[in-house]
Image (tube, coloured by chain):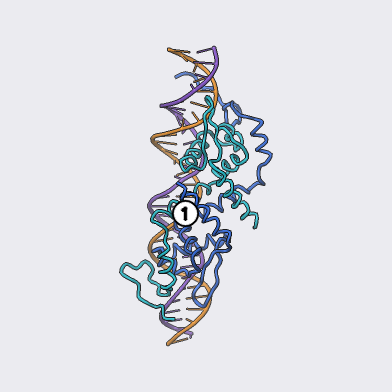
Chain colours: A cyan, B blue, C orange, D purple
DNA sequence: ACAATATATGAATATATGTGCATATAAAAA
DNA sequence: TTTTTATATGCACATATATTCATATATTGT
């Protein structure tokens, strides 16, 4: 196994143990540019305890901003800011009824993702 | 300016539109303490472009640290730091072969989660 | 019209965290 | 043993971001 070739021009990794065959195969499967960034941005929204608590609550029932504040014992602007983030990524949606705005999960796909995560940590 | 209404005792949310029936029902379904924190910590690991790139790469093939550096064009300590995070949460596992340490996804569940995320952003 | 209520938003701050550098550790080779 | 290679780790720094306060906007009621 003589996979020991010199790396090209602007080397990031000066180590020489690279398996060029594997790396090149995987490289050719690279997702379109920006895809992995959008993927991490998506998961990032589940990676904050405030937001994931909001999502868990909304997976149980549609609720207004004020309900979420009371349930999570958080200040209203904090909840609103996070709801805005979640809405911009189409993770939650809302509807207005007079002065009250009700939020809910945008689709059942989000609920399944939450359940998958819970299943994983249960396996600890 | 007009006089401001004083906040009642230790209320978190001084708004009065709370739907107490809904809130109490959802409150009773609250996960065990710490569960939502662990859930967000778990998702947080997918919420960084470096880590999610590593996970995507490992979903294609087992690779050593150096392979990942070359593929992602990143410095070795950065990759090692993130692999440590991923391993502590049992998202990846590794095996040693001489001087080389090979990393791979810990189980197929992780691969499915990645695919779910990709499906979601594809729907945008 | 005006006041009250429910939510949204801008700016500032504090905390969290990803990365780089230097260096330590572990294994193989000489 | 000593050297070389592959990976791990402690620390410092810079960036990102969650929260708060103050305030703006939108809707209803008087």
Screen quadrant of the N terminus of chain A: bottom left
- Crowding around mark 1 (Cα neighbors within 10 Å: few <14, some 14 to 19, many 20+) is many
Q: Which x, y percent locates residue A33?
A: 38, 56
Judging depth in this view, the residue of A1 and A47 nearest the camera is: A1
Instruction: Identify the residue shown where x is 43% and y is 75%.
Output: A17
Q: Which x, y percent locates residue A52?
A: 56, 45
Q: Secondary structure at mark 1?
A: loop
Q: Which residue has dot 1 on it? A: B48
Tell me which chain the residue with mark 1 is part of. Answer: B
Question: In which image quadrant can residue A29 be found?
Answer: bottom left
| Residue farthest left in this picture | A9
Placement of A21 over or under C18, stated as above or below: below
| Residue farthest front in this picture | B123
Judging depth in this view, the residue of B5 and A3 nearest the camera is: A3
Placement of A11 over or under A70, stated as above or below: below
Instruction: Identify the residue shown where x is 53% and y is 30%.
Output: A101
Q: Which x, y percent locates residue B96?
A: 54, 74
Placement of A101 over or under B105, stated as above or below: above
Q: Which x, y percent locates residue A34?
A: 40, 53
Screen quadrant of the C terminus of chain A: bottom right
Placement of B84 over or under A116, stated as above or below: below
Judging depth in this view, the residue of A52 and A59 nearest the camera is: A59
Give the tally of numbered discs.
1
């Amino acid at each position: 196994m003589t996979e020991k070739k010199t790396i090209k021009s602007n080397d990031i990794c000066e180590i020489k143990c690279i398996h060029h065959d594997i790396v090149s195969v995987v490289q050719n499967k690279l997702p379109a540019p920006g895809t992995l960034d959008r993927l991490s941005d998506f998961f990032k929204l589940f990676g904050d305890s405030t937001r994931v608590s909001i999502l868990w609550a909304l997976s149980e029932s549609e609720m207004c901003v004020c309900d979420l504040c009371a349930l999570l014992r958080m200040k209203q602007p904090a909840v609103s800011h996070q709801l805005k983030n979640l809405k911009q990524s189409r993770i939650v949606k809302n509807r207005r009824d007079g002065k009250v705005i009700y939020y809910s999960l945008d689709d059942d796909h989000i609920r399944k993702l939450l359940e998958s995560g819970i299943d994983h940590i249960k396996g600890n």
